[in-house]
Image: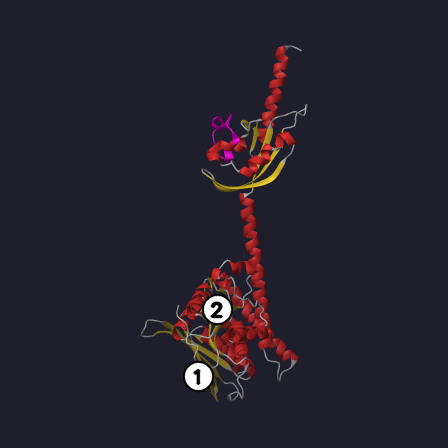
Amino acid sequence: MTMCNLMGDTEHKGCVLVVEDEVFLAMELEAALTDGGFRVLGPAASVRDALDLLTSECPDAAVLDFNLGRDKVTPVALQLKTLGVPFVLASASSAAELSRHAVLADITNLGKPTDLKRLVAAVRALHA
Amino acid sequence: MMLEDLYRLLKSGHVQAQGVVDTMTQPIVVLDQNFCVSTANNAFIRTFKIERDDILGENFFSLGDGQWDITELKNLISSVIPKAAAVIGFEVKHDFPVIGPRSFLVDARRLIHPDDNSTNILVLFDDITVRQRHDAEMEFILSETRHRMNNLFAVVRSIAMQTSIEDRTARDYRETLLGRLETTFRAQEIAATNDAADFEDIVRLAVGELGGDHLLCNGPAVELESAKVLSVSLIFHELTTNAAKYGAFSVPGGEVHVEWALQADPQGQTYLSCEWREINGPPVKPPERKGYGTKLIKGTSAQLHGEVELIYAPAGLSALLKIPV
């Protein structure tokens, strides 16, 4: 398992990957996380974009939507797991649907519409 | 009564009873006290694709590879005669050798007899395979609909939250909000019902009635895949809103020229390179702060892996958009 290098400098702002295909929601998540003191990687609108971003930079945490157009976010979740990056979901999908994917089974889903304060707090808890 | 008449009566009664059983569309078998098949109706023969001669007199639980030899069902049916009990709606899921995977609800009852000492059991089969598949499809559609409703609400909420309320009237806020919502819904409708859409059509639709004679489009036919329709619509909607407030669409003689061409980069990626140019509008000066409209244009372009440059030239705003197609 490859672990990310979490040893940043003291100025290190937590970097959060955002994967969301609805542009309005992606921008809202980005703004909320930026206001919360994080730096946003992305937002990525597709599985391919997210995986591309992960080859260039390893974030400290991630926020994932589940349905990305016709694809599911699972390959990104698996890659994050391999990299040891903790993540939360922000998806309108039911718990039953999500639990069908082993990699998402124990992951917190903040739901959609997403309470942004809760989201930032959840990401902060991951990052801590 | 002559013996012959009695025989005829009994025979016609038997024929009628067999007729009733055969008319039933549900598969039915009658078992004797040893669970051997004494009668099977046509529906049973048809449903399980078997020969009548192969099953008459055979033990029910050993039929067709012992597919009914299910301990629980066996115990239930065994209790039907001694306890005058009935088995109702016992679900059997089985991958049958000839007919494949099926689900049945099985009913077993003691056959009614005037002396109340019948030792025969009537077993009915209700094939619920199709019903279950249908229920599963309905459940899937409902869950998908719930999911889409939540998603839609999240989008609406997000647009309402991000449309700024500062320095504007309620009327202006409402118009801006509705403009964004309508563009979004219209674009989603196009994307959901088409695999691709014509770029010029999308631009004209996003600009709407403000365009008319004041919108001049010039470029080759370009097909936009449906996933890009919403983003492109939003970009041109926001440019239009801006032009209606401060630019070429705010004065009678103003015009917007939209020109585009396809270009390929050395890696073989094709780009749509498009210019939105406003002329004969009021003098333009760069905005003092970056509004949400501008952020939306930039964010949307980035989502498309494209670039956008807004040039606030005094003679009119130009927007240079480059997106991969």
Answer yes or no: is residue B1 visible.
yes
Residue B186 percent coordinates (x, y): 54, 67
The chain under label 2 reads: B
A10 sits left or right of B76 in the view: left
Range of residues picked out in magenta: B46-60
Magenta span includes B194: no
Going 58% across and 65% down the picture, which residue do you hit? Answer: B150
The CA span between labels 1 and 2 is 42 Å
Residue nearer the viewer, B247 or B94: B94
- Give amino acid for label 2: Val
Q: Which residue is mark 2?
A: B229
Going 41% across and 72% down the picture, which residue do you hit? Answer: A3
Answer yes or no: is residue A24 visible.
no
Q: Which residue is mark 1?
A: A9
Residue A47 percent coordinates (x, y): 44, 67
**Quarter of the image containing the C terminus of chain B?**
bottom left
Magenta span includes B56: yes
